[in-house]
Amino acid sequence: MNADSPRITTEQIDQARKVSLFTVLGAAVEKDYSACCPIHKGDNPRAFHVWKGDNGERWHCFTGCGEGGDVIDFIRRRDGCSFADAVELLIGEFEPMHYVPQEQPKQKGWQRPDWSIHSTRYLMRWVTHPKKYELWNEYKPLKRETIDAYQLGVGIVPQQKVCLHERLLVPVFEDGIMVSVRGRQIDCECKEKWLTAGGHKNVMYNLENIRDNGVVWVTGNNVDSLLLMERYPHYDAVSPLTGERTKWRKEWIAQLKAANTEQVIVAYDNDDTGLQAGVKLCNALHKAGIKARRWEWIDAPPKADIGWLLAQTVESAA
């Protein structure tokens, strides 16, 4: 379909072509770069090129599918839709959003990134993905209510150029502000199963939502925390954004104490990294006056996680 389609006008096509291709790809800055191709889902980080040329912003896959074009062509190839559908999507979802990096004063230590200028627009695109529930449940058996409550979605992880394929997205909030996004691989061939965007990665997932109910679980995966709370609503669960190797910040422990946490159960994965990190975390919590213990993975296979544990619970109940 082209500009002769009765559904769209020449003015609408021109408006769609003014949408930044870099914005559609979630780029941090409008600068030429290469990445894995999101069209044929290859793993060559130099296959897909995006650049600003004399005829505007262009893209091309040089080592895989050979596709290329402008921002409308990209939407058509990526989503498998018509020309008119691509134009309408660009006008409806992307036109107002342009990311402009904010100048931040240089300070020592951890500084919370500010995504406030564009986080709402990102979330609107992610959470309305037509296959959101289907794709999430192929990964983990989460309920629709949980997916919606925690604003899980599907899309491209913004502000990175390692992988431009759609991923399962987990937004991370701190003090009500979205400070990071995690993206889980769906069907691409990239080496990185998880990608994290949004500045500093030393953030504790779901910590701001813990209640004054005595027991908090710590898992090694954001989604495992959601699964645990879904199964046992009387528990709270948190998880370091970058897994078991994360160094705990003093304010995290202080926040646990402020919530009158009586006991922390550390349920990192059943592998050497998880077991060693669990011992270290329990010792730190004990020193802070918080009772803590590691979950004992009795008769569990290597690398077992919360998902495995909950599956066993269901089988036992059956």
Image (cartoon, rainbow, N blue to C red):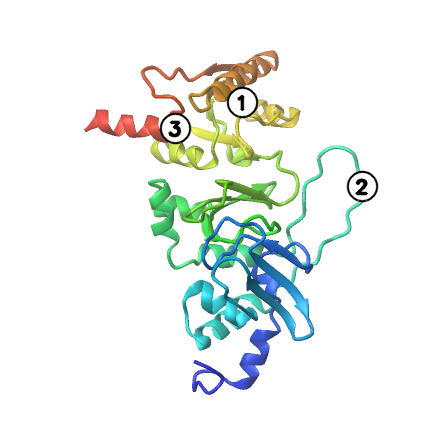
Q: CA distance from mark 2 to mark 3?
A: 39 Å
Write down the residue under mark 3: 306
For the question of whether residue 92 can be seen, the reply is no
Q: Secondary structure at mark 2?
A: loop
Write down the residue under mark 1: 260
Q: Give residue 299's position: percent from left, percent from top.
A: 31, 16
Residue type (three-letter) at the residue carrying disc 1: Asn
Q: Give residue 174's position: percent from left, percent from top.
A: 60, 40
Residue 132 image label: none
Residue at 41% across, 46% down: 147
Residue at 39% across, 43% down: 146
Residues 225 and 177: in front is 225
Residues 316 and 17: in front is 17
Q: Give residue 87's position: percent from left, percent from top.
A: 50, 74
Residue at 34% across, 45% down: 137
Image mark count: 3
Q: Earlier in the sequence, mark 2 or mark 3?
A: 2
Q: Residue furthest front?
A: 63
**Crowdedness near tag 3: few (<14), some (14–19) or many (≥20) residues, C-alpha within 10 Å:** many
